[in-house]
Every structure is written in C-alpha cells, then in structure tokens.
Image: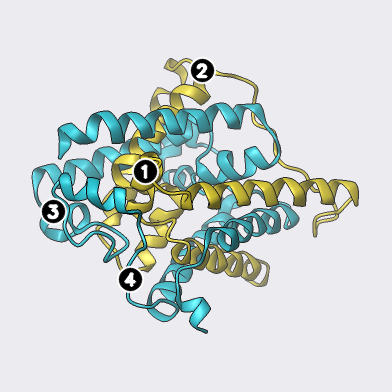
Amino acid sequence: MGKYIKFFIVGIFFGIVLVKSEAVSWYRIFEMFKFQSFHMYGIIGTAVGTGILLLLLSKKNNVKTIKGTTLNVPLKERGFTRYIIGGTIFGLGWALCGACPGPMYILLGTGAFSIIIVIIAALLGTYTYGLLKNKLPH
Amino acid sequence: MEYILQPWPWYVSGPCIAIVMFLLLYFGRTFGMSSNLRTLCAIGGAGKRVAFFKFDWKSQRWNLVVVLGAIFGGFIAHYFLSNPIHMDLSEATVKDLTALGFNDIGQSLLPPELFSWNSVFSLKGILILIVGGFLVGFGTRYAGGCTSGHAITGLSSLQLPSLIAVIGFFIGGLIMIHLIYPILF
C-alpha cells in the first residue's frame, strides 16, 4: 500500500491543476480549436517547455529514478500512419466531447457524472481498437 | 488563498503539468493517462478474447492509483479550492457559442447543452457523448497515446512520432469544430 501513496498524491496534484487551469473544460477546448484564446496554448507550451528543460537538466546531471535506474522516457515506435490517423480520430473525439482521457476522470470528481457515458464509450473504443488492431494500417 | 481560489493562469498550470510528468518519470514510470483504458479493459476480462488485452495489468496498478488521485484532486479543486465558476472566455468564443444556440456560457466547466441529464437523455445528446468518447478511446490507442503521453511527454522528449500524433489531434479537432459543429448545432 505504501508504495502507491506517492502515485495517489501526484494524481491529486494533477487533478487540482487541471481543474484550476480550466483545461478540463469543454469551453476551453472549443476556444482552443477556434484559435480565440492563448490560454490552452500557453498551458501546453509552458508544460512542454518546462518538460524539455527538466529532461535536459536531469540528463546532464545524470539523475536516477528512485529505483536507481537511469531516468529516461520510453521511446515511441517509429512510424507515420498510426500517428496521423489515430491522432486525427482522437482529435475528432476530443473536440466533440471536450475531454481527453485525463480530464474524463477528473471531471467525475467535480460531480459531472454524465461524463461516465464518455468513459464507458472510450473503453468501448479502446476495446474495438484491440479487436481490429491487426487489420489496421500502422 | 485568494490566488488559489481564482482560476490559475497558464504560466503556472503548464509548468505544474510538467512537474507531474517529471515526478512519474522519477518514480520510474511514465505519464500516460489513456493506458488506463487498456488496463481497465484487461481487468474486465478482455484478454480472454483479444490478445491486445492479454498482459500483466497488475504491473499497471500504479497508474490506476494516479487516476484515483486525479478524481479526488478534481473533487478537492472543485468543491474546496474554487470560487463560483465564471470562466474568462474570449469574447469571440462567447459570441460563436451564442450563435450556435448555447446559453450560460462559461458558468460551469461543462456546457449544460451537452452534459446536463436533460441533454444526455435526448438522442442527439447521448450520441455526441458516445461517439466522442468512442473516438477518443479508439484514436488514442491507435496513436499510442493521448495528450499526456504524446503532447506533454512525447514533445518534451522531442520525439517525432509524438509531433505527428499532435498534428493529427489538431487536424481532427479543427475538422470537428469548423466543419462538423456547424452541422450539429
């Protein structure tokens, strides 16, 4: 149990940040895809900028994980088709219901219980991908 | 305290998200929220029928704990750390949504036009949520990640596949908002 507490705390922090930044809001996603506000671009931009910096610094200082291994990011397989098609399908859904997989759960905590329908549908989508995986171009 | 109760500016929120990513890497894991959907399918027994779900899901329990925390964090932020919601959306957005027939814009995190039980129990309302959720779940696994895995973690580590995926996210999002929304609403 003890080893899970740190993940629980990181999760709490993540949930708070995403609500307080309004990144869980359907309205902010709509606004982003309309290019009518800098807000979401500012969040993603500073997240990536800080992320690049943290990863560079940890590499330079040879930071180890708590397990003692080298801290590194799992590499995505090379490819094009799956990323562009899968990404586009994801984007269509993201803009339609305004929630990506993190916010889906977080919204549940804010009492927006109708989001459960989105979560169940997302599970169904993931299951369907698993079924069709070998038939799809990657 | 007033600073916490108000919505947080992007330049505070963005770096905080990077810290979440970094902490998970420091714990020897990675930041990827959509993987939990696959794990939940596996827990539900999908591995008996589909090989893609036949993996050691117990090794992914830590990520489900992150999800539990995120739900709890959402609860705390919404009920204890927020002033009544009045989002500072751009005027252009409010105008466009009004034209589409939306009311009370930005008075809650989610528009009642899509998420109130009244809308959910209409055919159009439930279809939007089901189709939207389905596309997110299908697309994210096809692309091998979502906003956390590709846009934050993948771009932070300068990975080309993630850049392609994020371009895809935007192609899809722009098609939906600019071409499909005007038909839907």
Residue A124 seen: no
Q: Are marks 2 and 3 in contact (CB under 8 Å)?
A: no
Report whether mark 2 lies on the same chain as mark 4: no
| Mark-to-mark CA distance, 2 and 1 | 23 Å
Residue at image point 46% right, 37% down: B47
Residue B119 screen position, x and y as percent = 13, 53
Rendered image: mark on residue B85: 4
Observer-nearest of B11 and A123: B11
Residue with the mark numbered 3: B119
Report whether mark 3 lies on the same chain as mark 4: yes
Helix, strand or loop at mark 4: loop
Residue at image point 59% right, 32% down: B162
| Mark-to-mark CA distance, 1 and 4 | 30 Å
| Mark-to-mark CA distance, 2 and 3 | 36 Å
Q: Nearer the viewer, mark 2 or mark 1?
A: 2
The three-letter amino acid code for the residue at tag 3 is Ser
Give the left or right position of residue B160, taking residue A67 as reference.
left
Residue with the mark numbered 2: A81
Q: Are marks 1 and 4 in contact (CB under 8 Å)?
A: no
Question: Which chain is painted in yellow?
Answer: A
Residue B68 screen position, x and y as percent = 48, 64
Helix, strand or loop at mark 3: helix
Q: Are marks 3 and 4 in contact (CB under 8 Å)?
A: no
Chain B rendered in what hue?
cyan
Give the left or right position of residue A128, taking residue A56 as reference.
left
Q: Residues within 10 Å of mark 3 (few under 14, many from 20)?
A: some
The three-letter amino acid code for the residue at tag 2 is Thr
Helix, strand or loop at mark 2: helix
| Mark-to-mark CA distance, 3 and 1 | 22 Å
Residue A83 screen position, x and y as percent = 52, 25
